[in-house]
Amino acid sequence: MSSCSVRRAPRFTLVIVGALVASACTSAPAVVVSAGAPVDGNSFVVRNVRVFDGDGTRERMNVVVAAGRIMTIGRTTPPSGLPVIDGTGRTLLPGLIDAHAHVPSAASLRNALRFGVTTELDMLSDINVARTLTPRRDRLDRTDLADLYSAGSPFTSPRGLGTQFGLTFSTISRPDEAAALVKGRLAEGSDYIKILYEPGAPLFTTVSRETLAAVIAAAHAAGVLAVVHISSIQGARDAVRAGVDGLVHVFSDSLIDEAFAREIAERKVFVSPTLSIFGAFQSNGFGSALAADVRIAPFLSPAQRTELTKAGPGADHPMAPYLVRFDIARALENVRMLKAAGVRLLAGTDAPNLTAHGASVHGEMELLTQAGLTPVEALAAATRAPAEAYHLAGRGRIALGARADLVLVDGNPLVDITATRAIVRVFKNGFEVTRVLSPSATPPAR
Ligand SMILES: [Zn+2]
């Protein structure tokens, strides 16, 4: 990765010298992107573009954005007077959604947006930070941050998984505590309820099956979703049978059978596999390859690059007896079975753990195709599917009235999923996002 060189041309024009780069970074083709003049306002036309609308594609469309929302999609002549962006040979995607991230500060949301990830679903963080960042999501003004929804504090047992992160929150010991604790979480700003459930895991205690069920029931009684962190098939079985809405990792301690995969589908439980973190724990090199991709590398902060290329925890790591449950080969196979059974799958990364906000969503989509999803299905997993699963109105689709969170890419990700990385422009609330790293985050010259 350190041998990849990138030359930056003026704003919005990125030229990468293919011959030089290709020899050092074999994972990606040369990229030549010329995006034209930036757009100042939040009204414009993308002309003659392939549109992935969340379901499928439509060719040679004119997409009109007015005051930050999609106004028309069609082949009729767009109204005159608006800035026009040429979409020839390009694909317009809904803004991407990371269905499993952790957001310790605004910087995470800035990193996400540079890579076209316009919404992040946080799965455990400091609620005091989260609630300073979530209100902006209802506005349509210019921003350099992705929008945030947050679980805030999780539900876990005393000395359970999650208590080691140093956050201050109440743990739960008994089912009859569930209703009041759920009410408290929602009052402090959680958008949904996240439970950590790890039966049989070494190192940590876990909530009981009865407490798990009581928390899920209390969340539903309060009208919000309940999602569960599991890493074992037993944990998944208990959670699914307790009525959970979603599993925010796939399990990989053992292989799923067809009957259980069907049961998950029939109960309409969604799964965010987070394959990115499974590979990273095992130092499988996927993160380093992503960091070396010439379409990704120039936009990574030094901290993001460090995290992506870091070795996973070794056998002497204090968490090793627990982390042994995470196995990328079994995870891929389980996702393959879930997909075959028709389970709704969401793209999540677990960023920033050994992954990178924004960038790793592109990697996760590739991993989902390795697990048998078609490129259309992988794109839906990062757009429409999480919007539907979490009831995020006006997101995840290019549809009339939707907010103009958009990513314009070169080429056709429906043929090659990695084309999502060839970003030409990102729009948030209809405003073009400056993808240039802030000076403090600019990587040193190599
Ligand atoms: Zn996580």
Image: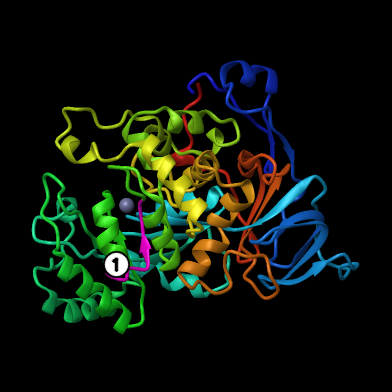
Q: Position of residue 38 (x, y in %)?
A: 72, 52
Any atom of ligand 1 within 8 Å of the CB at mark 1?
no
Q: Which of 29 and 4 is in front in this view?
A: 29
Range of the magenta residues?
Answer: 242-249
Can residue 124 be seen here? The reply is: no
Quadrant in the picture for residue 84: bottom right
Q: Where is residue 311 in the image (x, y as percent from the top left)?
A: 32, 28
Relative horizontal placement of residue 12, taking residue 288 as reference (left or right): right
Q: Which of 282 and 299 is in front in this view?
A: 282
How many marks do you count on the picture?
1
From this viewpoint, which residue is outermost toward the front? 259
Relative horizontal placement of residue 209, taking residue 10 as reference (left or right): left
Mark 1, Cα crowd under 10 Å, few <14 / some 14-19 / many 20+, is few
Residue 399 vertical position relative to residue 323 in the rendered view, above or below: below
Q: Where is residue 54 in the image (x, y as percent from the top left)?
A: 64, 61
Can residue 72 be seen here? The reply is: yes
Residue 52 vertical position relative to residue 393 in the rendered view, above or below: above
The chief SS type of the magenta part is loop
Relative horizontal placement of residue 113, taking residue 192 as reference (left or right): right
Decide whether residue 243 is among the magenta residues: yes
Color theme of the render = rainbow
> Could you tell me which residue is drawn at 50 percent across and 71 percent down?
392
Q: Where is residue 117 in the image (x, y as percent from the top left)?
A: 53, 54
Disc 1 secondary structure class: helix
Q: Label 1, on which residue?
A: 241
Decide whether residue 88 is among the magenta residues: no
Q: Label 1 is placed on what type of residue?
A: Arg
> Could you tell me which residue is drawn at 41 percent across and 45 percent down?
334
